[in-house]
Image (cartoon, helix red, strand yellow):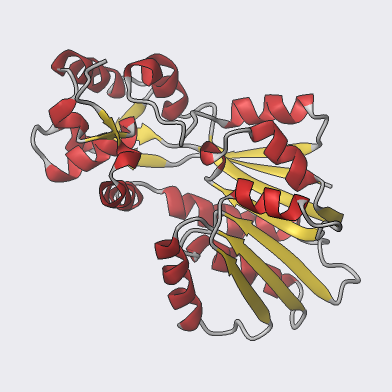
Amino acid sequence: MASSMKSLFSDHSRYVESFRRFLNNSTEHQCMQQFMDEKLPGIIARIGDTKSEIKILSIGGGAGEIDLHILSKVQAQYPGVSINTEVVEPSAEQITKYKELVAKTSNLENIKFTWHKETSSEYQNRMMEKKELQKWDFIHMIQMLYYVKDIPATLKFFHSLLATRAKILITVVSGTSGWEKLWKKYGSHLPREDLCQYVTSSDLMQMLDKLRIKYECYDLLSTMDISDCLIDGNENGDLLWDFLTETCNFSTTAPPDLKAEIMKDLQKPEFSVKKEGKVLFNNSLSFIVVEA
C-alpha cells in the first residue's frame, strides 16, 4: 500500500463533501423514501397499539431528513398520539442541521425531540450504568452500523430495549451491491481506519441468525452515477473516488496501477450497469426489520 494514501476520515470536511457528492449522484435517499412510503406503514402498523405515547430511538440520525420521513409515517398511523423521539448522533454539525430542519417543519406539535451528542457505544455504556433500561417502540439504525466496533453486541443490546410489538429497522448496503465486491477485492489495498468496517446485509443476517433474533430483509435497487470517475481530473469524480475507496484524495495519491485496476472493474456488470451513456454503480440497499 502506498504510504501517501490516507483514510478519508482523517479529513472531516473532505469526508462531508464527498458524502454530499455521493447523495447528489446516487438514488440513496430516493430509495430510502420509496421504502418508507411503500413498506414502512405495514411494519409500524402495530407498534403503538394501546399505548398513550410512542417512544422512538434514532441511532445515527444525521441531519434528520430520513428521521422526519419516518416520523410522518408514525403520525399517519397514530394520529394525535404523543411521540417521544431521542436522537443519538455523534456529530454536532449534523445535530445543528437536524434542529434547523425541525424548526422549519410543520405538523410536529405532538413530537418531543431530545438529542444526544454521542456514538451508539457511548449511549449503550451510559444506559448500562442505569439500573433500569428504557424500552422503545421503534428503533432505527440507518446506514450507521459500519461505525460500530462490536456489531453483534450492539444488535443484542438494542434488541433488549424493544417493548411489546416493537421493531428495529436497520439499513445497510446489500450483499448483492457493488460495495460487497469492491470491499472483498480491494479492502486490503486501501488505508484502513478502526473507525469504519466493511459490513453488508449478508454479514448482518449471519450475525442475527447466530443471535437467534427474528428478522425480515427487504432489498431495494439503488444506483450511484460514477461516470465522472472515468474522467481524469474531474472534481466531482475525484470526490466520488474518495467516497468509493474511503481514501482522501485517492485519484492523486493511489498507485496508478491500483486506480486503473479498480476503474476497469467498476465498469464490469457485477459492479455497474451502463445506461444512456452513464455508468451506474450498484448501490442496492437492504432494509432489515428486527422483531421483539
177 or 249: nearer the viewer: 249
Question: Which quarter of the picture shows residue 164?
Answer: bottom right
Residue at x 82% of width, y 59% of height: 135
Evaluate whether residue 94 shows in this view.
yes
Q: Residue furthest front?
A: 129
Q: Residue 125 or 72: which is nearer the viewer?
A: 125
Left or right: residue 104 compared with residue 191: right
In the rendered image of this protein, does residue 140 appear above or below residue 191?
below
Residue 198 at what x, y percent from top left? 49, 28
Which corner quadrant of the image does residue 50 belong to?
bottom right
Q: Is residue 283 left or right of residue 278?
A: right
Point 40% across, 64% down: residue: 93
- Measured from the top left, where is residue 147 in percent x and y? 51, 40
- Residue sitting at x 78%, y 70%: 54
Percent across and percent down for residue 201 are 59, 31
In the drawing, does residue 62 fall left or right of residue 149?
A: left
Q: Nearer the viewer, residue 100 or 270?
A: 100
